[in-house]
Image (cartoon, rainbow, N blue to C red):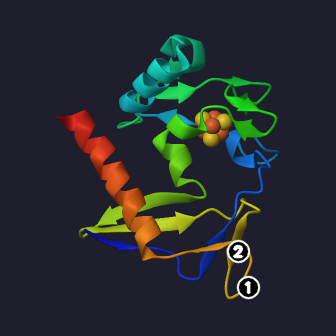
């Protein structure tokens, strides 16, 4: 499992809620794996159709989270009300797995998140290889679960 990740990156969630809804420059699409939707359905005791709509051509994602007033339906007072069982895509934020070329996965950090600090400043928790390895293992486990 080879992967590349941004070095010297620090991150602390400032609970701005930016990642959970539309911004002035971006329409947010919170995409869900089937396993995400089923887990949220079981934990929240809400039918999938209440919080997500089906999508096509976005495999492995098969649902998109519904929004109210441009924000994810599970965002309450700028906090995720399903944090412990939130979707994989939310666990990755503020990173995304961009490419899978020649056996190397590449993490990219989003520039929009105010909780991200690049460089040598001592703000936030420094994220090392283990953090990204755990994310990748989680993603591979979820994706493999889908294909089995
Ligand atoms: S599930 Fe939680 S973390 Fe993900 S977009 Fe909704 S409120 Fe934000």
Q: Is residue 62 above or below residue 125?
A: above
The crowding category of the residue bearing disc 1, from other C-alpha atoms within 10 Å (few below 14, some 14 to 19, many at least 20), is: few
Q: Quadrant of ligand 1?
A: top right
The crowding category of the residue bearing disc 2, from other C-alpha atoms within 10 Å (few below 14, some 14 to 19, many at least 20), is: some
- Dot 2 corresponds to which residue? 117
Residue at the left extreme, as displayed: 148
Q: Secondary structure at mark 2?
A: strand
- Residue 86 visible in the displayed image: no
Quadrant for the C terminus, please: top left
Residue 4 figure quarter: bottom left
Q: Mark 2 near ligand 1 (CB under 8 Å)?
A: no
Q: Is residue 38 above or below residue 129?
A: above
Residue ID at (40%, 33%): 33
Residue 133 figure quarter: bottom left
Residue ID at (69%, 63%): 12
Q: Is residue 37 above or below residue 80?
A: above
Residue 76 drawn at (x, y percent): 76, 31
Residue 122 drawn at (x, y percent): 72, 83
Left or right: residue 106 compared with residue 140: right
Give how far apart the Cα atoms at labels 1 and 2 are. Answer: 7 Å
- Residue 115 visible in the displayed image: yes
Disc number for residue 121: 1
Q: Are marks 1 and 2 in contact (CB under 8 Å)?
A: yes
């Amino acid at each position: 499992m080879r992967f590349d990740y941004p070095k010297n990156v620090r991150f602390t969630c400032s609970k701005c809620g930016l990642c959970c809804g539309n911004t002035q420059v971006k329409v947010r699409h919170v995409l869900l794996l089937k396993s995400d939707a089923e887990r949220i359905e079981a934990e929240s005791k809400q039918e999938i159709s209440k919080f997500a709509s089906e999508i096509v051509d976005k495999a492995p994602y098969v649902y998109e989270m519904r929004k109210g007033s441009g924000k994810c339906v599970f965002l309450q007072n700028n906090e995720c009300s399903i944090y412990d069982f939130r979707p994989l895509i939310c666990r990755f934020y503020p990173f995304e797995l961009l490419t899978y070329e020649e056996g190397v996965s590449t993490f990219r950090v989003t520039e929009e998140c105010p909780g991200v600090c690049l460089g040598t400043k001592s703000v936030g928790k420094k994220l090392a290889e283990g953090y990204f390895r755990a994310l990748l293992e989680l993603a591979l486990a979820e994706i493999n679960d889908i294909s089995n």
